[in-house]
Image: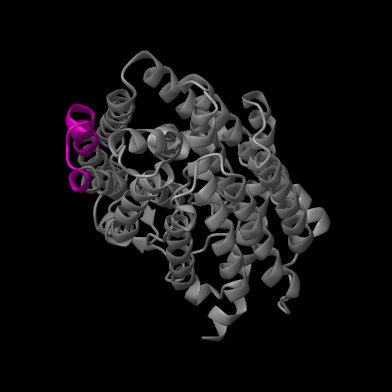
Amino acid sequence: MHAFRSVFVLIVAVWFLQLAGGTLGIIVPLGLAALGADAKMIGFVAALYAAGMMLGAYLAPQIVARTGNIRTFSAAVSLTVVGSLALSFVLPIWAWAPIRIIQGVGFAAMFASAEAWLGQAAPEDQRGSILSVYNVAAKAAIMTGPFLIAGAAPLAPHTFVLTGLFLACALIPVCLTKQIEPTRQKTKGLPIRYVARMAPSAMVGCFMAGVINTGTFAFLPIYATGVMPEMNPITAAALAFAAANGGALIAQWPLGRLSDRLDRRTTIAGQCLLSAVAVFALALYGQTLPRAAILGLLAVWGVGSLTFYSISVAHGIDRMTDGRVTELMGVLIICWATGSVVGPILAGLVVSLFAAGTALFFFTAGGLTLLAVAMMARRSARPATVMRSRWHPAMPAPVGLMGARLHKFRTPSGPKQKKDV
């Protein structure tokens, strides 16, 4: 219990951050659509947000090393609150782009400082359990946030003000904590070519998580309002997000444990094919299915698509025989963020060319199928046997929610000798 008390304030702070992130993930695309932005512009703004997160993930370790976790966290929260309050003025479409870049930088810095602190404060023998609690709490906040503004108009100023309040609340536990900040550390970079040689499947998996999931989430609120027109737009989008994230929350741990027993690439391929079938059904029949069926298929999509990121990370950890896992995480974050820049742009182009309701899920199904084929191809080409660590949860990073995972990752139970991925 003492271990959980030592990190409780961080979990509470991140819970508030995820409330804000989940809410912004819905009201930003719906707000842009209400202003008349087309699919390409909505995708472009989502891509700029991801680019901001990439920049924030790059800068955050240097800032934390220079100023400490609490100062970095506080400055990043203030920066992001300013962005949320600015959006409440219903600015012209072009003004949303720089604001979302700034918010991307802020969110990445907030999560980098909080999670680096969490990773060092958690005792090694309880780190897996604490990260599990952290991830469940974060996912619950992501699902809860949008429902707190259910029934509001997409451009209602109070929705953006509320996200600012959530962010401000995250400052309170961090600034008042009696816990000692972790020692400021500097880590050496890890060459991308080295990771590409040691764990190419991990890089591909994280990149495709950004492409597929960020691209889909950028337009999921708009799809939800189209197939549930009788509902308030924000309420419909909140239900869609809750269904997808709920499926991921339920399946993450069982799938992670399964990947401890099977080739992780086989697990990822199976997840992708399962989700591809679900979204392909949505692409074909998503305009005519009843609401319960749509939400059920979105949950199945979440089961496979929103969980393979952490298993890809586990694959990369398996391959790092030299123990440079902290540096590895930085490379995988770059892969995810790069995919998150590409994904919304591609999805926006596809949606703008075809019917918005069906084209989105053809894009998603195509990406999932491509990843499944790539994983099985890598498995056939490189059925290596190496030391494997047990899987531990890593938060998937949909748009609006990503944090930089820069803490040291050491497994509490030590490595196991098993057939590799």
- The image shows residue 13 at horizontal and vertical percentages of 61, 65
Residue depicted at 17% across the width and 42% down the height:
290
Q: Is residue 411 found left or right of 281 in the rendered image?
A: right
Q: Is residue 290 magenta?
A: yes
Q: Nearer the viewer, residue 28 or 394?
A: 28
- The image shows residue 334 at horizontal and vertical percentages of 57, 37
Residue 414, image quadrant: bottom left
Q: Is residue 207 magenta?
A: no
Q: Nearer the viewer, residue 411 or 94?
A: 94
Q: Is residue 55 found left or right of 24 in the rendered image?
A: right
Residue depicted at 43% across the width and 45% down the height:
234
Number of marks in the rendered image: 0
- The image shows residue 397 at horizontal and vertical percentages of 48, 46
Prevailing SS of the magenta stretch: helix
Residue depicted at 29% across the width and 30% down the height:
361
- The image shows residue 360 at horizontal and vertical percentages of 33, 27
Residue 298, image quadrant: top left
Q: Is residue 316 found left or right of 192 in the rendered image?
A: left
The structure's colour scheme is one colour
Residue depicted at 64% across the width and 31% down the height:
96
Mark yes or no: residue 189 visible.
no
Question: Looking at the picture, does residue 383 appear above or below residue 126?
Answer: above
Mark yes or no: residue 198 visible.
yes
Q: Nearer the viewer, residue 224 or 58?
A: 224
Question: Looking at the picture, does residue 28 appear above or below residue 137?
Answer: above
Residue 261, image quadrant: bottom left
Tell me which segment is drawn in magenta: 277-293
